[in-house]
Image (tube, rainbow, N blue to C red):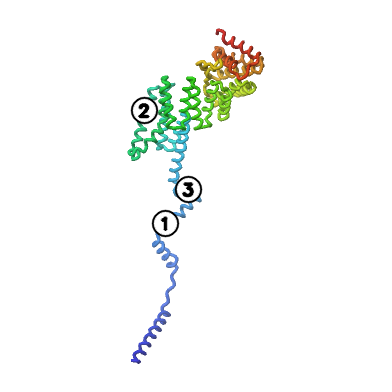
Amino acid sequence: MEHDALLLTRLHELELDLQAIKAKLIKPKDPSPVDRYLRRPWNWVLKNWGFCVFVLGLCFAVWTYTRYGVGYFESQKSISLRRESSESYRHLGDKLMLYGEFKAAKDAYSRALKINDSNIEATRGLLQTEVLEPLEGQKYVIPEIMQARIDHLRDMMKTAEESGLSGFLGLRTKTIESESYLLDFFEGLLHQDKNESNQAKISYGKSFEKNPKFIYGYIAYAMLDYENHDYNSAITTLEAAKRQDPNSAYVLDILGACYMFKEEFQKAAYYFSESSRISATLSNSMELSEAKRYLMEADDARQLDEAIIEQISETRNEKERFLENDLLFGFLPETKGKAAPNENQTMITLDEKKTGLYYALALDHALNEEFDKADESFTEAARLDPGKKYDRYVRNRIVSLEHLSIKELPTATQTWMNKKVLLLSSPK
């Protein structure tokens, strides 16, 4: 038994020795260059093909971006930027609509559609701007055509309101209603054209109730009261508009006109001054000088009128922004506490505007008792008005100034004005 154990031990030792000898005799071969530099890397690439493609694409994207400034998702970025650019113009059109700048809004909507012809909001906005356009060859819009366009747009909005899941659930009703404020405004214009003032006011009221930012709706509503000499109501509406946009020169200008007719000349001068500060026009500049005359600030009025005359004398183009709009001035009360005559004076051409300015300058000089200069300006105004179109208007301004100015006029000034009133009252 002991002999067998020794034999087993010896065999185990021999086995270990054989394994050691075998390990020394069999050495692993060094890999060939082909295996090391070609076959092994290729096998690794095949095993990790997805990762390699990702790294290759990432490297290519980095190279194109650094070399050409082109991003990997350039096409998607281009689509996004095109939509954003189109929306920017569309929002500009919407903003212009709020101020009644329909021609400028049409241009903005057209640009939006040129960039992205699938912008449905811009398409709807463009259609709304075309409601006020006359047919080709026509000078004025035909009411029946305008009504047909309004009805068509309402049908379009109703269809949009009922379309899709949101329409089925009634979620778009409020949105569509708020978008229809312009159609209410256009219907107001139609009623006003037919001398239906009450219906026009209702439509204008709906327009800014649906969209409180719609400044032009407030203005149209207030102008109906203004024309009916209900200045307190007009001021209430315009103050609401001013709360929405304190920097609307048009709103401030009409507020000044309301206070002129209420014989509150200090407030009138303030609003005309603010309007002119924001956007100077011939209208608010002339109105400011007029308010200054009633406040007996003749020097300020003269400086304003002389500056305006000098400015328009250098302007040959009647489309200059300062001059381009037609002017409409109401007749002022001729006696304290009395209603104003229901008349208006228009100034359309450049000569007509100069006529009004020279008459105003004559009054400025008369208040300062500079009667030679006053006669000179008065004569120049009469030369520009051979048909005596402005006689009634100028007479109104002289009589009104005599009775409503906050201080008593100098005796010599009153005498000069009385002579001019007699001259203007004489038969043509």
SS at mark 2 in the image: helix
Front disc: 1 or 2: 2
* Numbered badge on residue 70: 3
> From what the image shows, is residue 381 above or below residue 282?
above
Which quadrant would residue 401 be assigned to in this image?
Answer: top right
Pick the quarter of the image with the N terminus: bottom left
Q: Nearer the viewer, residue 383 or 68?
A: 383
Mark 3 or 2 closer to N-term? 3
Front disc: 3 or 2: 2
**Residue, disc 1:** 53
Amino acid type of the residue tagged 1 in the rendering: Val
**Residue, disc 2:** 151
The alpha-carbon separation of the residues under discs 1 and 2 comes to 59 Å
The image shows residue 199 at horizontal and vertical percentages of 40, 23
SS at mark 3 in the image: loop
Neighbor class of circle 1 (other Cα within 10 Å; few <14, some 14-19, many 20+) is few
SS at mark 1 in the image: helix
The image shows residue 301 at horizontal and vertical percentages of 62, 22
Neighbor class of circle 3 (other Cα within 10 Å; few <14, some 14-19, many 20+) is some
* Residue 184 in sight from this viewpoint: yes
* Residue 318 in sight from this viewpoint: no
